[in-house]
Each structure stands twice: as C-alpha cells, then as structure tokens.
Image: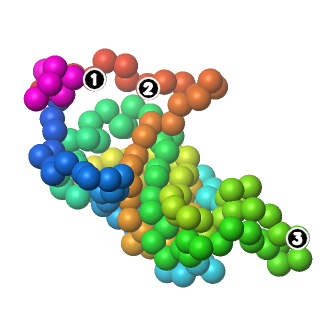
Amino acid sequence: MSQEDALRPGEQRLAIAPDDDAALRFIGHIETPFPERADCPRQGSEEGPECTLVLKSDYAPALLGLEGFDRIEVLYWLHRARRDLLTQNPGQDGVFRGTFSLRSPLRPNPIGTSVVRLIRAEGCRVTVRGLDCLDQTPLLDIKPYRCDYAPLAKGKNIKVK
C-alpha cells in the first residue's frame, strides 16, 4: 500500500478487487413511486414525493456526516434507457437535437444526476425529495451539493469514533 493509499485515523475502507477498466459499482438502489418511465416527472421537484436511497450495508459508514447538508447530489444508472441514440426529437415536433445537448435519459452512458433535498439518513436508508428516476434504479454515488451559492456543511466538526 502506498503512502497515498494509507488510511488516516478514523477512515474506513471496503475491500474490493481492483478494476481492469472503468467498471462502475452500484452501491445500492433507489425506491421511488415511479414504476414506468411515463410515471416519472421530467425533472424532479423538492415538493415531489419522498424517495429512498437504499445502500448496501457495507456502505453504511460512508453516510457519516451526510445529515450536515440540506441538499445532496445523487448519481444513478438509468438501467432501462436506450444507449444508441445520437439525435433525438424530445418535443416530437420534428426538431432534432444532439443527445449531448439534452438532459434525456437516452444516452451512451446513461448516468442520471439530481440535486435533491435531504430529509433524513437512518442506517442504510437515505430519504430525499426531488428524484425523477424509476423504482429500483441502481444507485452509483451520493455527494454533498455545493456551489458558489450553497452553504458548506451545517455541522463542520464531525467526530469519528
């Protein structure tokens, strides 16, 4: 293990095999009230229904300190999306646009991202508002949302036991 890989006091890691490419690891799944694409809102809303990020138990320690944020960014794999479209007609009006100029879920690497309001985190479950993905969508990552206008964390000094 190199000096860069050494754990600092209080850090925890998951023993995983090294990748031979850019493989993604799903850290859990998302529970939403949207079983079909037609049920999903076009964009999530903070007034929308509560949804739950369900992490695999090995990732529970990674949630430490998350409740210090009002908003988080959720990254997920759009597992039922087509991956072969280069141009699309989203308004079905004959006006085509390139996939990279759209927020459509239909893309070569269908990674979805949403900034959501954090309601609570308990055990391996994180409750949020503002998602726009299907029920049982694979979860890729969770990050605190920060930008030039967003506060950092509410609780700055988080103690690790």
Q: Name which residue lies at 45% across and 72% down.
A: 79
Dot 3 or dot 2: first in sequence order is: 3
Label 1 vs label 2: CA separation? 10 Å
| Camera sees residue 17 | yes
Which of the 4 image quadrants contains residue 37?
bottom right
At label 2, counting other C-alpha atoms closer than 10 Å, the crowd grade (few under 14, some 14-19, many 20 or more) is some
Q: Name which residue lies at 44% across and 26% down.
A: 153
**Regarding mark 1 in the picture, which secondary structure is present there?**
loop
**What numbered label is drawn on residue 158?**
1
Q: Identify the residue position indicated by label 2 in the image.
A: 153
In the image, what residue type sits under mark 1?
Ile
Q: Position of residue 136 (x, y in %)?
A: 39, 72
Q: Position of residue 96 (x, y in %)?
A: 83, 69
**Regarding mark 3 in the picture, which secondary structure is present there?**
loop
Report the span colored magenta: 1-9
Label 1 vs label 3: CA separation? 51 Å
Label 3 vs label 2: CA separation? 43 Å
73 shown above or below 77: above
Q: Position of residue 5 (x, y in %)?
A: 18, 28
* 6 falls in the magenta region: yes
In the image, what residue type sits under mark 2?
Ala
In the image, what residue type sits under mark 3?
Val
Dot 1 or dot 2: first in sequence order is: 2
Front disc: 3 or 2 = 3
Q: Are marks 1 and 2 in contact (CB under 8 Å)?
A: yes
At label 3, counting other C-alpha atoms closer than 10 Å, the crowd grade (few under 14, some 14-19, many 20 or more) is few
